Image (tube, rainbow, N blue to C red):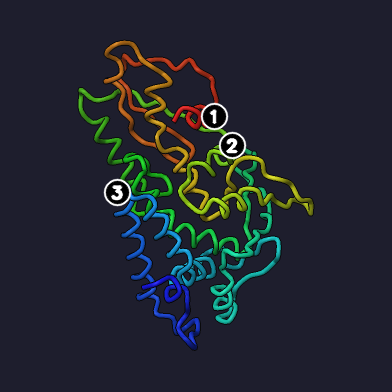
Amino acid sequence: MNAAALACAPSGTSWDGIDWIAAQRRVRGLQARIVKAVQDGRHNKARALQWLLTHSFSGKALAAKRVSENKGKNTPGVDKVTWNTPRAKLGAIASLKRRGYSPLPLRRVLIPKKNGKTRPLGIPAMKCRAMQALHLLALEPIAETTADPNSYGFRPERSTADAAAQCFGVLSRKANAEWVLEGDIQGCFDNISHDWLIANIPMDKAILQKWLKAGFVYQRKLFPSHAGTPQGGIISPVLANMTLDGSKRCWRRGFPMQSGQLEKCRWCVMQMTSLSLAVRKSGWRMKSGRPWLNFWQSVD
């Protein structure tokens, strides 16, 4: 099927008349082909398939459906627009075009944390959410194909039960690790390098750059965004996961151990903003204070 046929909606289509099972099947078929292309090292083919998916009617329809029927469907962005009617949802599908797309800044809200501090949350406009959901359909197959095997945070078909099972496997026997080291990446979402994301994330670079540079509005003032990916964006967890992928290799290269100690260290769990290592009692000390994100983005 050519690109024009994929992008066109059937004549006389209504929101309630869309065959969602068929749309899901078409998108899954393209995603499977993307995975196969990545596994075969055919990256140009994978990019071409991503382009087909992000320009397809089925992909746009599923993206609009996701953002208009989830828990945040009644939460507007800075334009105060929501898609609450079938007509608005159908119009949203037609509006998801690359040409002329200019994202609106995010609406910044502060979410209270248990420790009394606040977490900044960026709420995109509905169209920006849908565009992120659309490009996520094309990016996630690559992210899942290249992801670290012991990464569990914000991964499809993975849960805390899977992480617990991995912990049990590396901690349950006498010969296994006896200590667990846990670390937290302060401001993980807020400090990811824009330049690194644009250079390394396999998606439409122009669209990604527009999202990263959209800025945010807080108390009726517009602020630029120089680093980070906003908490609240649909695609942000995948971008953060892809940034964290490869951190095990950075541990090995950045913090060399004494002879024989390297084999006593086993990578156990890698979540979104916290990392855990299972090590032997005769383990090693980490003496570097270099910020995590700057460190592994510079050496990976």
Contact check, label 3 and label 1, Cβ < 8 Å: no
Identified at 49% across, 62% down, the residue is 134
Give the mark nearer the N terminus: 1 vs 2: 2
Q: Circle 1 sits in a helix, a strand or a loop, which is it?
A: helix
Identified at 34% across, 16% down, the residue is 283
Q: Which residue is mark 2?
A: 191
Q: Amino acid at mark 1?
A: Asn
In the image as oriented, which residue stretches furthest toward the right? 220
The residue lying toward the viewer, choosing from 262 and 300, is: 300
Which of discs 3 and 1 lies nearer the camera? The answer is 3
In the displayed structure image, the side of residue 83 where residue 148 appears, left or right:
left
Give the mark nearer the N terminus: 2 vs 3: 3
Q: Which residue is mark 3?
A: 39
Contact check, label 1 and label 2, Cβ < 8 Å: yes
Q: Amino acid at mark 3?
A: Gln
The residue lying toward the viewer, choosing from 258 and 11, is: 11
Q: Is residue 296 above or below residue 14?
A: above
Q: Circle 2 sits in a helix, a strand or a loop, which is it?
A: helix
Q: Which residue is mark 1?
A: 294
Q: Residues within 10 Å of mark 1 (few under 14, many from 20)?
A: few
In the displayed structure image, the side of residue 244 where residue 179 appears, left or right:
left
Q: Quadrant of residue 153?
A: top left
